[in-house]
Structure formats: C-alpha cells, structure tokens
Image: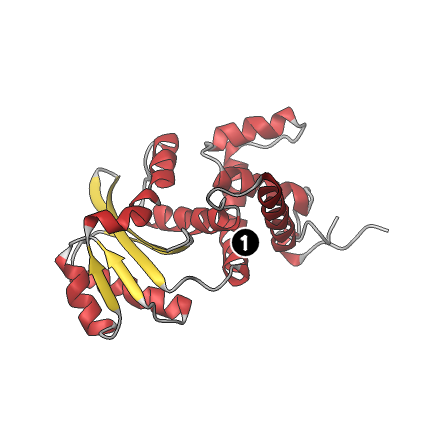
Amino acid sequence: MKSPRHSRYARHRFLAEVLGHVVWFYFRFPLSLRMVEEMLAARGILGSHETVRQWALKFGQSYAHQIRRRLPTPGDKWHLDEVLISIAGKKHWLWRAVDQYGLVLDILVQSRRDAKAAKRLLRKLLKKQGVVPRVMITDKLASYAAVTRAVMPDIEHRQHHGLNNRAENSHQPTRRRERIMKRFKLAGQAQRFLSVHDQVSNLFRRVANPSAADHRLTRARAFQAWNEVTDAATLA
C-alpha cells in the first residue's frame, strides 16, 4: 500500500525523496540552477532550472527551520563579523555570527555598517538563541563595543582582528556561491538563500581532524536527520 504524502508535497508529482535531494544539491554544493537541472536530467528526472528555483524557495526555509531545532546548543563563545557584498551594484554588508565550533548562529544582510546594524544583529541572535554568550569576539569596528555595552553589558567582549579568523573564514562558502550565482540580485534574495544555505552547512559540517570512522558516523547521522526533515524517511 502506498504511503500518504505529507501535505507540503501535495500536488507534486515527485516523491519527497526526490524533492529533498534537489534542495540538498542546491544548498549544499556550489551549483547553479542549471547545473542541478542537468544532474537531474542525467538521472531521468526532467524539470527546468526554474523548477529547481521554485522548489528551493518553497521547501528550503521550512527545512532550515527544522534543522535549526535539531542542532545542538551553541557554544558560549560567539564570533561576529561583517563582510562587504555587492547587490545590484550597491554596497551591502553580510553580518554573520558563529560559535567556537564553527556552527553558524545566524546571518543578516543590511545596507549599513554602523551601531544600528550591529544592534539589530545582536537582538536577532539573542531572540533566536535564547541564551547570552560568555564571550563575544569581533573585529575592531567601534559599533560592536558600543552596542555590546548597551545590550549585553555583562559579557566579556574581545576585539582583535587575529582572534576572529573563525568568523572571517565562515564567509568563504558565500564567496563561492556569489561567483556561481553571478552575485545576488536582491538583498531579500541573499537573506533567504544564505539563511537556508548556512543551516544545511551546519547539519553536514565536518569536525576538524576526525577519524575516518567518526566522519562516516557523523555523516550517516546527518543524512538520517535530513531524511527526517524532508519526510523522505517515512513517506514514499
């Protein structure tokens, strides 16, 4: 007997496993929409690059929310950094926070690089994480110090360029995707894409210097979690 479909897949002719795999391809690897389309065609699944885009928009955020709920409690040391990105020829700033283990806590695309933008990021982090960090590490942007004193006056705040490599390195996957996508077209598009991209990366991130056995076990658990998030584990 055929299993019932989850309501999110109503009116889709493809199985949950196929739809979830397409979204995983797009957000997990530096692939363009047309590259994903071609990979599907090689497996006998016919659909346009626009179909891939619509699936990513429809299901990506839902998957990301479920991944966030499954991730372990973040570390007590937060690294914050901002990087310049060009959107439609205008300067924007991508603000990102990661913990000491490399888990991306949140991102925020803003048109400003000042105290107001830093405060918005911190308030979003506190609301989403529900905890206050023990230590916060940033670069020497003065806005961080001013906002930290106002929002989280009791934490230890370290400002040093050399201490913030973890946050700075977290921008590298974004740079790769920018090149593949030929830059983001809208600030909202960048926010939506990266908020999903970073959560998928969190789920499948590789711990530094694991043994082969530990790596295989961690990867198997990530795939199991992904199948549960996409309902591929229970629905046919």
Where residue 213 appears, as percent x and y from the top left, is 62, 42
Name the one closer to the observer, 155 or 94.
155
- The answer to which image quadrant residue 30 occupies is top left
Viewer-proximal residue, 57 or 226? 226
Q: For the point 16% across and 57% down, which residue is it?
A: 114
When the figure is inspected, residue 144 is found, relative to residue 195, above or below; the finding is below
**Residue farthest to the left, as pictured:** 142
Q: Secondary structure at mark 1?
A: helix
Q: Residue at x 66, y 28 (%)?
A: 43
**Residue 150 percent coordinates (x, y):** 19, 73
Residue 130 falls in which quadrant of the image? bottom left
Numbered marks: total: 1
Q: Which residue is mark 1?
A: 63
Q: Is residue 26 left or right of residue 119?
A: right
Q: Is residue 69 left or right of residue 134?
A: right
Q: Residues within 10 Å of mark 1 (few under 14, many from 20)?
A: many
Residue 80 visible in the snapshot: yes
Residue at x 13%, y 59% (from the top left corner)? 142
Whether residue 93 is visible: no
Compared with 79, 185 (above or below) is: above
> Looking at the picture, which amino acid does disc 1 mark?
Tyr
Residue 63 in picture, x, y percent from top left: 54, 54
